[in-house]
Structures are given as C-alpha cells and as structure tokens.
C-alpha cells in the first residue's frame, strides 16, 4: 500500500486556476466518492479551501496516478494543470498532512481555520465510507500534532486569519476604518471573523447580505448591523465604502456593469472590494474602473508575508515539533506493520500449546475445573515467556527500520511480515493512536468539523 497526495495551492497555482477546480461543500461528498471509485484507490479524502485543493489517498501501489482525476472531473486539459500540481508519497505525504493541519503551510501561518477545514473534509470522507484504518490513523495523528503545536508554541498566540489580513488591508488603504460603512456579502465563518475585526477597528455601519436570510439576520444582530435582502444586493452596495465578499457562488456576482452603477450613485467616491471567495465573487474587470479597487485572496499574500516575518521564531519552533511528531508517527506505523508477524508467531505458539495439551490429555486423566484452569494458566504462562524475546526483537527491528534483520527474524521463526489489515486494526485499537471516532481533543470528528471553507 502506498500513501499518495497531489494538490495545488496558493503557492503553485494562481486563483484563476484554483477557482476552476474548487469543490463546494455540497459537491464534496460526491466528488470524494468519485475519487474512491478510481482503480487502485483503497481509501481517500479531499481538502478544498480557498487556498488549496488536495487529494489524499491510500493506493495499491505507486502505479496509481491521481493526477488524471482533476482534469477528467472538471473537464480540463491535463497539460493545463500538470505544471501546477505537487505530488507527494509516503513519508513526504505524511509530513505535508501534518504541516497543513498545523497551519504551517497556510498563507497566514498560524491561522486556526485550516484545522477545522481538514477535520470537516475527514468527516465528509468518513460519512462517504472512503476512509479506513490507514487514513484514520494518519489524520488522527495529524490532529493530535496540530493541537500540540497550538498548545506548546506561540504560533497561535494572536488571532490571525485570512479575514483579519483582509481587514488589515482595508486599514492600510483607508488609514482608519472609523466611520466607514462595510458591506459583508456572505454570512459564513469568514464573514463573521471579518466582522469581529472590523468592529475592533472602529468600523461604522455594517451591512450584511446572504442568500439564507436567517443567517444574515443572526450576524447582523450580533454586530448591530443591518440586513440587506439578497435580491437588493446591488441597490444597497453603493452605500458601502468597503465590500468584503465571501460567498459560495460558482460565478462572479459583482461585474463591471455593477461597478459603473455603484460609482454613478456614489458620485465617483471610491469603493474597495476585498474578495476572499474561491471561485471569486468579483469580476477582475471591475478593478479596471477608475475609483473601484479590487483585491482578491492572492493579493492578500503581501500582507500575510508580514505576519510570517513576525512569526518566524514561532514557526521554526512549530516546524521542529512537527518533525518530531512525524517521526513518532512513522515509528508507530512501523510497529503496526510488524503486527502480522507477531500475530502469526502467537498463532503458531498457540497451535503448538493446544497440540501438546491434547497429546498428554489421556495421561492426565479426569481433571477438576480448578485443575484444568491451572494447566491452562501454566501452559499459557510458559508460552508467553518464550514468546517475549522474539516479539521484542521483531518490534525493535521494526522501530529501527532494520528490514534486513526483520526479514531474518521472520525467516528464522517461519512467519510473514506482510501487511494484514485485521492485525493492523487490532494494533491501532490497542492504543497506537487516538480512539476511533475521536479527534485529538477528545471530541467526535462530526462535532469538531463545524469550521467552514472561506
């Protein structure tokens, strides 16, 4: 079995390409099942956020190529995507998953949303029946490592996110947000975070619009804002100095003709659009109008880079911690992989024990229940004592990654070190990782996956 990961992110592909392969929350279960149906895919999950689309799978062998899935699923030429895709296998894939969950691969290093997004993707895959022991062990270990990073380093000491970076950009543009009217289009998690930062920076009136009006009303009440019915979006937008848009619309909802109308009603007073949606909510052509300034999520990278510089020491500490957790994961995994040999050795010894008891049964005569129990305990105790040295030797060879010694031990005791899924599950259940169905914080994955995509 091979662990493989392919993906594109904000570092390898522009937003123009990322938005063409973005997967909405509604589409994610079906797309995950489609990936699982590929020949050679044993387990899989998909992470799709505003900054990345990644496919993670346990496959039968290195010959299984996931790269074909994205162009085929989205009707694109493979050549269009191939130069932007990164590919990772086995140890590199494990390290990447750990770093993503710990927010070390994020545009804003230390932002807390990505862990919730990965948990949500894992919950969708689990509900779709596309994950089992291999990915379960990997993801639960990654969640535990991410929690450790946040509790043992200062990387999450201040509240930083894509939303806060967007507000920082608005502040840079205006100098002060005091008295500025802000229009939040979309009432999801990112809009809520943006609203909190805007209020802290002294923004004036806050307008909220969302296709589901109840959500818009709840957010408006929380921030003393005003609800704008979605059908009145274009009439009300011209009131705003700053529009922060983060919807799940598949196509731009603000186009050039809308910008022209806004400027006319505002008598050419400037408007700033900060588009943190993927696919984008604002047509880039709007930014060509004099008086309309459009910034998309890729434009936020310069602001995010300043946060990275401020957090360089914390990021270095977190990287060291993650490297140690990845090594621990591989040590545990090597122990899991030797489980079939240990199970086979135990089975072999048990067969010998039972055969010997059967051979001497006639000479022992009729035994009482207490005597039978004593014989059982004696024979089992002797077998366990004899098994202890070879079992420890197998585990030690596995921990050290000494395949030559492992093969020699297996040959000497005539057992196999091949993979066995039942044995693997037995080892995991005995404590090699977090309990099935729980994340690193002890909550069920479904409870922990409430975070939403940008």
Image (cartoon, helix red, strand yellow):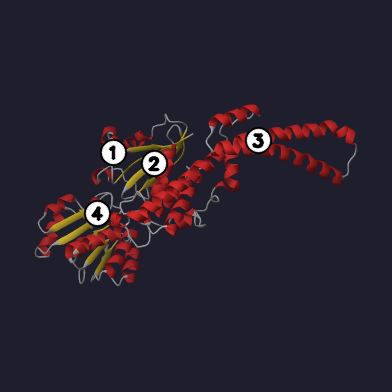
The quadrant of the image that shows the C terminus is bottom left
Which quadrant of the figure has residue 147? bottom left
Using the numbered discs, state the Cα–Cα distance from disc 3 to disc 4 in whole angstroms. Answer: 58 Å
| Disc 2 + disc 4, Cβ < 8 Å | no
Instruction: Locate residue 158, reporting x and y percent.
Output: 35, 63
Q: From what the image shows, is residue 371 above or below residue 282?
A: above
Marks 2 and 4, how far apart in space?
A: 25 Å
Disc 4 crowd, CA 10 A, few/some/many (<14, 14-19, 20+):
many
The residue wearing badge 4 is 300
Q: Residues within 10 Å of mark 2 (few under 14, many from 20)?
A: many
Distance CA(mark 2)–CA(mark 3): 40 Å
**In-image side of 237 versus 354 (left or right):** left
Q: Earlier in the sequence, mark 1 or mark 3?
A: 1
Mark linked to residue 55: 2
Q: Would residue 218 appear left or right of 37 to someone viewing this image?
A: left
Front of the two marks 3 and 4: 3
In front of the other: 128 or 269? 269
Residue nearest the viewer, comparing 5 with 102: 102
Q: What's the CA distance linking mark 1 and mark 2?
A: 14 Å
Q: Nearer the viewer, mark 2 or mark 3?
A: 3
Which residue sits at x=34%, y=62%? 159
Q: Secondary structure at mark 1?
A: loop
Sequence-wise, the earlier of marks 2 and 4 is 2
> Horizontal and vertical percent for residue 287?
15, 53
**Of label 1 and label 4, which has the lower sequence position?**
1
What element does badge 3 sit on? helix
Q: Residue at point 70% right, 32% down?
A: 348
Give the structural element (helix, strand or loop) at label 2. strand
């Amino acid at each position: 079995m091979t662990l493989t990961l392919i993906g594109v992110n904000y570092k390898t592909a522009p937003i123009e390409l990322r938005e063409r392969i973005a997967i909405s929350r509604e589409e994610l279960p079906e797309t995950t099942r489609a990936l699982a149906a590929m020949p050679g895919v044993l387990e899989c999950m998909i992470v799709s956020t505003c900054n990345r689309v990644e496919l993670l799978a346990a496959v039968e062998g290195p010959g299984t190529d996931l790269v074909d899935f994205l162009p085929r699923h989205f009707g694109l030429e493979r050549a269009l995507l191939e130069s932007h895709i990164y590919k990772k296998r086995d140890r590199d894939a494990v390290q990447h998953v750990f770093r993503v969950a710990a927010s070390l691969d994020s545009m804003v290093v230390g932002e807390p949303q990505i862990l919730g997004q990965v948990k949500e993707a894992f919950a969708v895959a689990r509900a779709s029946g596309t994950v089992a022991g291999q990915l379960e062990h990997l993801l639960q270990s990654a969640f535990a490592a991410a929690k450790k990073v946040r509790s043992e380093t200062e990387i999450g000491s201040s509240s930083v996110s894509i939303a806060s970076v967007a507000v920082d950009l608005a502040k840079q543009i205006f100098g002060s947000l005091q008295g500025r009217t802000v229009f939040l289009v979309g009432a999801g998690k990112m809009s809520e975070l943006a609203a909190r930062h805007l209020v802290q920076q002294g923004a004036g009136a806050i307008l909220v619009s969302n296709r589901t009006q109840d959500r818009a009303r709840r957010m408006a009440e929380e921030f003393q804002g005003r609800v704008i019915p979605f059908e009145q979006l274009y009439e009300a937008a011209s009131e705003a100095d700053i529009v922060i848009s983060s919807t799940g619309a598949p196509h731009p909802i603000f186009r050039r003709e809308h910008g022209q109308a806004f400027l006319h009603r505002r008598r050419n007073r400037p408007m700033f659009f900060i588009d943190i949606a993927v696919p984008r909510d604002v047509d880039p052509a709007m930014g060509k109008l004099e008086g309309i300034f459009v910034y998309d999520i890729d434009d936020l990278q310069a602001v995010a880079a300043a946060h990275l510089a401020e957090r360089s020491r914390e990021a270095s500490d977190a990287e060291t911690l993650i490297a140690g957790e990845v090594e621990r994961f591989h040590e545990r995994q090597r122990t899991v992989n030797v489980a079939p040999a240990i199970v086979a050795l135990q089975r072999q010894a048990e067969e010998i024990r039972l055969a010997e008891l059967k051979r001497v049964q006639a000479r022992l005569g009729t035994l009482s229940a207490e005597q039978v129990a004593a014989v059982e305990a004696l024979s089992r105790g002797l077998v366990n004592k004899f098994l202890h040295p070879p079992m420890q030797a197998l585990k030690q060879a596995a921990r050290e990654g000494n395949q030559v010694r492992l093969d020699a031990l297996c040959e000497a005791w005539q057992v196999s070190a091949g993979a066995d899924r039942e044995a693997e599950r037995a080892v995991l259940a005995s404590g090699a990782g977090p309990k099935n169905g729980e994340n690193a914080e002890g909550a069920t994955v479904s409870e922990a996956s409430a975070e939403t995509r940008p």
